[in-house]
Image (tube, helix red, strand yellow):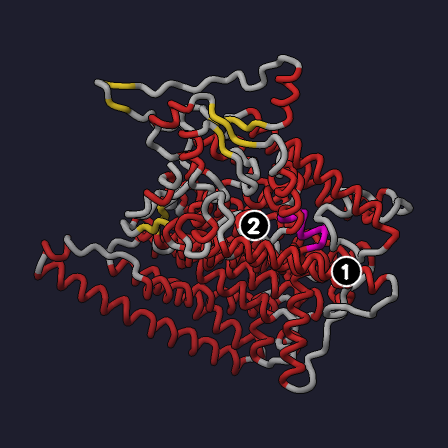
């Protein structure tokens, strides 16, 4: 009989026993019951400790030592149980009413005790089973960090990882009725991620499957978490804390796996596994805490929202780097990280600081511009857009959302990265294709005489499309930003445009001083770097910024670094900052042509807007054009170069009174065709007083903080 035939059933028995004991601890309503469950966990750990002592140096002396240690541990463990039982019985006899009014509830300290004992028991089992399967103690402790390496080797072993995954899955199944359904789903996916631990087996196929499968699992976790946040504007405090912490752990886990793939270091990854276990069992051991009355309104908690976005983004960055590294090694035989040309961490303190900045900047830029990161982000944020499709009623908005998803897949991922590199290796460089290779304008490639025609053609197309359809073709369809901004949860963060100190500076359609300064600096930087790039390519000057062509560096800074910094800081700067603040130079050029085009928002009936008191259109605007209501009431239309035609205002209007006017209507009138045939719903009147109709669709914005209602529609009204 092989050792697997013996150890696997034992491990399965341990999984079942531990899961049932954890449920006993979570459901304990009396102190003796909780103490009894803890004692049984201690007893399992004591037996495993005795087995470990024996296996380290098999023989009669070790067997005797093991028996003594096991007996002493069990004896000490039964003492608290006995004392607890006596005290509980005494209280029950002395004061039955007080005893009945004080049911036991697992506290945080009790949960930490149980978690520590479970982890210790699992560690001992992993070590015992590794030794029993023929692994030597020297091999088990091999590594540069002594005891830390020993712990790391045990924790990442299959006996620890697979057993722990089994305990997680069985535990959540046993407690599923006591946990919220969305949380049960997330915990189940978390179990799968634990099961797909790449370090558990040395088989290359397993490692590849585990990395790809684990990445998919994390994307699912992030999507489920963000959708839960969207559907529940008030979240129980324990769940809010769990989201931020588990997403942070996954960031640590992805960083650990990246270090393991690139440098063979597994200690950071192992730490993430242990922390994940603490969070997991800390949640399921106290299900009653999820029903607490303490809830947070996250749209009024910018720090929490920032922590949520930041932890997800860190995990995504290292996940993208891990996929770039893994796919490069597996399919192309190239070390992706080694190709970045990072600086060494040697020399003076100033040199080290410069190397840290340089390496961090270009690591971030390289990851965010990579195919696999963009594909991962497209799947993740695109899923939120798909959820938005289910509650979108306007056919025009639905069509735009489908075009947006298709454009992202085609023009952001497939054509620039896959089509040219794999499908047609002999095709021309992307930079020679108008509006594709130069999708964000000057800066995609070095500016040279040979590409002038392509650049000019790109901006001619930008001008024509912007005059015809407004900047919505770019800022709401063609660019990568709208897919990431317009999913359900992120779209709901547009409430920060009205509540964040920085976001409020950019409200309204006027060019405020701060907006004008941002716009001026952006365009001056574009002109300056373009001139330097051209002079460099023609040999007049030899100039670069951090070793890059000036326009390429400016492009990288704007769209591979700054854009993501602004995305993560939405709670402080507001949503859609590339539009609201005016730092996207291609968007600025598009808005200049939009000003002389046909694009604007119009209403079917001005009287409906005059009678309306909801201000929902202004609240729904993702770029903070809060004064549109006044224009609708006085002029019946609203034209702003900041408007990017998302259509949330149209969706938010409870009376179907808004529509987008563009070249279609101009052409339609020329041929006698009525394009905007839809008519608004009339406002009901009861006894001469206005009664607003409740909206059927879920509200997409946060309620205004007390005292700030006038900031949303009262301007220019």
- Residue drawn at x 61%, y 65% is 256
- Residue drawn at x 50%, y 46% is 490
How many residues crowd around disc 1 within 10 Å: few (fewer than 14), some, or many (20 or more)?
Answer: some
> Where does residue 436 sit, x and y in percent of width and height?
76, 43
Left or right: 21 as drawn, with respect to 440: left
Residue 12 showing in the rendered view: no
> Where does residue 355 sit, x and y in percent of width and height?
67, 76
**Which secondary structure lies at badge 1?**
helix
> Where does residue 639 sit, x and y in percent of width and height?
53, 35
Left or right: 595 as drawn, with respect to 696: right
Q: How many marks?
A: 2
Task: Residue lying at the far top in this picture: please name it.
Answer: 672
| Closer to the camera in the image, 546 or 455 | 455
Main secondary structure of the magenta stretch: helix
| Closer to the camera in the image, 363 or 441 | 441
How many residues crowd around disc 2 within 10 Å: few (fewer than 14), some, or many (20 or more)?
Answer: many
| Closer to the camera in the image, 286 or 203 | 286
- Residue drawn at x 34%, y 73% is 75
In which quadrant is the C terminus drawn? top left
Q: Is residue 583 above or below residue 261?
A: above
What residue range appears in magenta? 369-377
> Where does residue 549 sit, x and y in percent of width and height?
77, 63
Q: Quadrant of residue 366?
A: bottom right
- The image's mark for residue 531 is 1
- The image's mark for residue 192 is 2
CB-based contact (under 8 Å), mark 1 and mark 2: no
Choose the circle earlier in sequence order: 1 or 2. 2
- Residue drawn at x 34%, y 56% is 25
């Amino acid at each position: 009989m092989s050792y697997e035939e013996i150890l696997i059933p034992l491990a399965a028995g341990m999984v079942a026993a531990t899961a049932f004991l954890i449920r006993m601890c979570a459901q304990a309503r009396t102190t003796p019951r909780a103490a009894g469950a803890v004692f049984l966990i201690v007893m399992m750990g004591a037996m495993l400790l005795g087995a470990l002592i024996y296996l380290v140096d098999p023989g009669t002396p070790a067997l005797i030592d093991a028996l003594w240690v096991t007996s002493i541990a069990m004896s000490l463990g039964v003492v608290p149980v006995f004392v607890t039982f006596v005290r509980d019985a005494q209280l029950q006899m002395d004061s039955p009413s007080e005893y009945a009014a004080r049911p036991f509830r697992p506290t945080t300290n009790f949960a930490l005790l149980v978690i520590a004992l479970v982890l210790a028991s699992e560690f001992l089992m992993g070590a015992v089973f590794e030794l029993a399967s023929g692994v030597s103690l020297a091999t088990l402790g091999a590594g540069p960090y002594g005891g830390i390496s020993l712990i790391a080797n045990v924790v990442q072993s299959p006996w620890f990882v697979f057993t722990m995954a089994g305990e997680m899955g069985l535990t959540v199944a046993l407690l599923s009725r006591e946990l919220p359904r969305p949380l049960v789903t997330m915990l189940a996916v978390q179990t799968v991620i634990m099961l797909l631990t790449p370090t558990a087996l040395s088989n290359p196929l397993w490692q590849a499957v585990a990395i790809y499968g684990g990445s998919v699992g994390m994307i699912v976790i992030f999507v489920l978490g963000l959708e839960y946040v969207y559907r529940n504007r008030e979240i129980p405090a324990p769940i809010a804390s769990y989201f931020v912490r588990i997403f942070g752990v996954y960031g640590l886990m992805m960083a650990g796996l990246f270090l393991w793939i690139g440098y063979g270091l597994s200690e950071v990854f192992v730490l993430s596994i242990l922390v994940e276990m603490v969070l997991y069992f800390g949640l399921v051991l106290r299900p009653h805490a999820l029903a607490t009355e303490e809830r947070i309104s996250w749209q009024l908690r910018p720090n929490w929202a920032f922590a949520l976005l930041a932890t997800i983004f860190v995990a995504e960055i290292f996940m993208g780097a891990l996929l770039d590294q893994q796919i490069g090694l597996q399919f192309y035989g190239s070390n992706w990280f080694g190709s970045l040309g990072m600086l060494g961490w040697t020399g003076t303190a100033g040199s080290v600081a410069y190397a840290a900045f340089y390496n961090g900047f270009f690591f971030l830029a390289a990851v965010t511009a990579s195919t696999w990161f963009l594909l991962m982000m497209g799947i993740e944020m695109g899923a939120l857009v798909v959820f938005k499709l289910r509650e979108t009623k306007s056919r025009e908005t639905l069509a735009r959302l489908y075009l947006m998803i298709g454009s992202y897949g085609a023009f952001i991922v497939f054509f620039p990265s896959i089509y040219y590199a794999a499908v047609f290796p002999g095709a021309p460089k992307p930079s020679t294709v108008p509006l594709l290779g130069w999708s964000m304008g000057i800066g995609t490639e070095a500016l040279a005489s040979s590409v002038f025609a392509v650049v000019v053609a790109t901006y001619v197309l930008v001008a024509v499309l912007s005059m015809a359809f407004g900047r919505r073709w770019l800022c709401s369809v063609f660019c990568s930003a709208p897919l990431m901004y317009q999913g359900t949860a992120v779209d709901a963060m547009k409430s920060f445009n009205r509540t964040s100190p920085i976001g409020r500076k950019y409200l309204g359609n006027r060019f405020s001083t701060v907006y004008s300064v941002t716009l001026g600096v952006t365009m001056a930087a574009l002109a300056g770097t373009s001139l330097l790039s051209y002079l460099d390519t023609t040999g007049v000057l030899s100039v670069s910024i951090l070793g890059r062509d000036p326009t390429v560096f400016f492009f990288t800074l704007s769209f591979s670094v700054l854009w993501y910094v602004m995305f993560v800081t939405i709670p402080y700067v507001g949503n859609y900052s590339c539009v609201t603040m005016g730092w996207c130079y291609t968007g600025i050029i598009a808005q200049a042509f939009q000003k002389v085009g046909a694009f604007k928002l119009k209403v079917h009936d001005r009287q409906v807007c005059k009678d309306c008191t909801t201000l929902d259109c202004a609240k729904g605007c993702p770029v903070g054009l809060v004064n549109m209501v006044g224009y609708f009431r006085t002029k019946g239309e609203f034209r702003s170069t900041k408007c990017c035609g998302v259509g949330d205002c149209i969706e938010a209007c409870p009376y179907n009174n808004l529509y987008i006017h563009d070249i279609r209507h101009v052409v339609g009138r020329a041929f006698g065709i009525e394009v905007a045939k839809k008519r608004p719903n009339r406002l009901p009147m009861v006894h001469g007083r206005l009664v607003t109709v409740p909206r059927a669709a879920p509200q997409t914005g946060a309620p205004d903080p007390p005292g700030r209602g006038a900031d949303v529609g009262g301007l220019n009204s």
